[in-house]
C-alpha cells in the first residue's frame, strides 16, 4: 500500500511532470507484489476534505485501506505492508501502531524528528535558493521562536496568536518580509496540520513497531536531510530485530538521480524514480515475504 507525502496528491503522487507512485507500482507488480494506491481525501475520486485533515486523519485512511485489503481473497493476510514517502512514512507508522496491523513498513525519506527536521529544512532550502549562511544565521532565531510557538500551542487559534506575537516588525524585517505579509505567514504557519506535525514525536511510534522496517533516504535530500534523519530513526528502532537503514548516494527527496538535490531540479530531471530505489525496495520485500510464492500487498 502506497501512502503519499505532504499536500493533496492523487494515487500516482503526480507532481512536476512525474508520477513516482505509478512507476513504483508498475515495478513492484512486475515482480509479483500486489499494490494498492488511492487518491488522498478530497482528491480525484476520493471524498472528504483535505484542508481540514492532519497526519492522524490520513493514518485512519491508511487503516481503512488495510481493512479493504483484508477482504480480498487474492491477498495474503499476513503479507500486507505500508510504503510511505515523506509525510506518508510518518502516516504509515502512525497507522501501524494505532489502528492497522501491517506486516512491514517501508519509510522513504520519512521524518524521524519533526522539530529538528523543520529547522534543518529551512537552512538547506535557503542555501539551495542562494541565501547566504550569514542571512540564514540572522533569520534562525526568529524561525526557531515561530516553530516553538506553534509546537507549544493548544489549538490553531492559540498558535496564530503566539505566531503573531513572535512576528513583530523587527522579526519581519529580519525575515525580509513586509508587514503586509504578516497575516499570510500566520495562516501558513499556524494551521492544524502544521501544529500536529510539530507536536508529533516519531520516536514514540517507531519505538512500538516490531515488524520489519526498511528506512531509506537520498544523500542529496534537501527536504529531509539524510544523516540526522536516519540517525533519529535508527535510535528509535534500536529494539527492533529486523531493521534496514540505508543512505542512497546521489538521490534527492523524490529518489531521483540528482546533481545538487535542490527542489528546482525535480521537474528538469528526466528520471522519475531511481532504479536503485526500486530494486532495493523490491528485493527487501521479496526476501521476507516471497519464499512460498504467496500473494502479498
Image: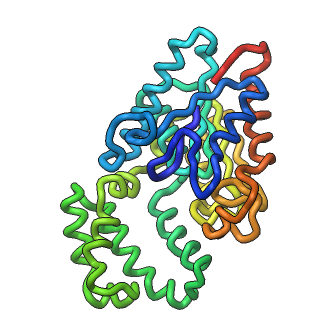
How far from the left and from the top, in percent, is residue 159? 25, 63
If the image is split into quadrants, where does the N terminus sit? top right
Closer-to-camera residue (40/97) = 40
User: Residue drawn 40% across and 54% down?
Assistant: 197
Location of residue 176 by image quarter: bottom left
As drawn, is 90 to the left or to the right of 292? Answer: left
**Residue 55 seen by the camera:** yes
**Residue 210 seen by the camera:** no
User: Residue drawn 42% across and 27% down?
Assistant: 99
Location of residue 148 by image quarter: bottom left
Closer-to-camera residue (97/270) = 270
As drawn, is 71 to the left or to the right of 217? Answer: left
As drawn, is 244 to the left or to the right of 161? Answer: right
Above or below, 155 relative to 105: below
**Scheme by which the image is coloured:** rainbow
If the image is split into quadrants, where does the C terminus sit? top right
User: Residue drawn 35% across and 90% down?
Assistant: 173
Q: How many marks?
A: 0
How far from the left and from the top, in percent, is residue 90? 50, 45
Above or below, 188 relative to 67: below
Above or below, 169 relative to 265: below
User: Residue drawn 45% across and 39% down?
Assistant: 44
How far from the left and from the top, in percent, is residue 262? 64, 70
Closer-to-camera residue (239/120) = 120
How far from the left and from the top, in percent, is residue 222? 61, 66
Amino acid at each position: 500500500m502506497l501512502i503519499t507525502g505532504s499536500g493533496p496528491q492523487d494515487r500516482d503522487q503526480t507532481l512536476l511532470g512525474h508520477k513516482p507512485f505509478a512507476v513504483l507500482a508498475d515495478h513492484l507488480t512486475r515482480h509479483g507484489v500486489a499494490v494498492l494506491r488511492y487518491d488522498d481525501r478530497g482528491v480525484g475520486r476520493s471524498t472528504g476534505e483535505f484542508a481540514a485533515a492532519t497526519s492522524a486523519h490520513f493514518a485512519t485512511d491508511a487503516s481503512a485501506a488495510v481493512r479493504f485489503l483484508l477482504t480480498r481473497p487474492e491477498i495474503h493476510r499476513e503479507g500486507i505492508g505500508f510504503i510511505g514517502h515523506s509525510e506518508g512514512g510518518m502516516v504509515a507508522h502512525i497507522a501501524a501502531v494505532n489502528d492497522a496491523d501491517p506486516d512491514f513498513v517501508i519509510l522513504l525519506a520519512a521524518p524521524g524528528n519533526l522539530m529538528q527536521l523543520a529547522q534543518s529544512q529551512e537552512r538547506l532550502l535557503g542555501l539551495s535558493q542562494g541565501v547566504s549562511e550569514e542571512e540564514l544565521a540572522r533569520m534562525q532565531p526568529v524561525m526557531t521562536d515561530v516553530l516553538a510557538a506553534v509546537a507549544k500551542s493548544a489549538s490553531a487559534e492559540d498558535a496564530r496568536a503566539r505566531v503573531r506575537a513572535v512576528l513583530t516588525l523587527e522579526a519581519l524585517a529580519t525575515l525580509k518580509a513586509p508587514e503586509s505579509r504578516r497575516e499570510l505567514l500566520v495562516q501558513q504557519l499556524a494551521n492544524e496540520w502544521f501544529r500536529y506535525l510539530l507536536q508529533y514525536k516519531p520516536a514514540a511510534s517507531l519505538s512500538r513497531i516490531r515488524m520489519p522496517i526498511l528506512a531509506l533516504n537520498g544523500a542529496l535530500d534537501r527536504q529531509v536531510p539524510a544523516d540526522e534523519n536516519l540517525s533519529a530513526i535508527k535510535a528509535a528502532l534500536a529494539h527492533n530485530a529486523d531493521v534496514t537503514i540505508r543512505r542512497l548516494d546521489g538521490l534527492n527527496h523524490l529518489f531521483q538521480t540528482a546533481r545538487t538535490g535542490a527542489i528546482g531540479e525535480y521537474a528538469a530531471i528526466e528520471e522519475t524514480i531511481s532504479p536503485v530505489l526500486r530494486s532495493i525496495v523490491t528485493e527487501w520485500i521479496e526476501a521476507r515475504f516471497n519464499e512460498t510464492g504467496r500473494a502479498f500487498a
